[in-house]
Amino acid sequence: MDGKTTRAGRPINQLTPARRLIEQNIRKLTEKALQNALLGDTAAISLLLDRVWPARSHVPTKLEPASIRAAVSKGLLSPEQGQNLKDFAEGYNDAG
């Protein structure tokens, strides 16, 4: 070790006791959050979805085929995401 420390005086890369405790129990914590989400806990739902599907910026708000194609061509959406959004938009437009 090269002796580098953080401002708090801990060696760099040393886990705090709280972080170590969380990492030792991450599987249980994740399972509990999922159980709570499935029971309708909106905070747990938000927590899990924010980690799995983080908010994307610069996604078109209009569900028009040209906007979707432009987002795919600019790399803002993957081709698969573009196709899924196009399919959704077509179903939404047909229902309305």
Image (cartoon, rainbow, N blue to C red):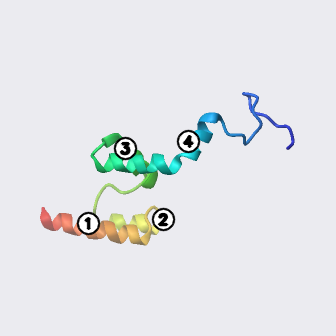
The local crowd at label 2, few if under 14, some if 14 to 19, many if 20 or more residues have their Cα within 10 Å, is few
Q: Quadrant of residue 19?
A: top right
Q: For this view, does 62 lie left or right of residue 75?
A: left
Q: For this view, does 72 lie left or right of residue 24?
A: left
Q: Are marks 4 and 1 in contact (CB under 8 Å)?
A: no
Q: Nearer the viewer, mark 2 or mark 4?
A: 4
Q: Amino acid at mark 4?
A: Ile
Q: Secondary structure at mark 4?
A: helix
Between the C-alphas of marks 4 and 1, the distance is: 39 Å
- Disc with the residue nearer the chain's start (3 vs 4): 4
Q: Quadrant of residue 17?
A: top right
On the image, numbered disc 2 is attached to which residue? 75
Q: Secondary structure at mark 2?
A: loop
On the image, numbered disc 3 is attached to which residue? 44
| Closer-to-camera residue (78/31) | 31
On the image, numbered disc 1 is attached to which residue? 88
x then y, percent, for residue 82: 37, 68
Q: Amino acid at mark 3?
A: Ala
On the image, numbered disc 4 is attached to which residue? 22
Q: Nearer the viewer, mark 2 or mark 1?
A: 1
Q: Quadrant of residue 77?
A: bottom left
Task: Give the number of the disc on residue 17.
Answer: none
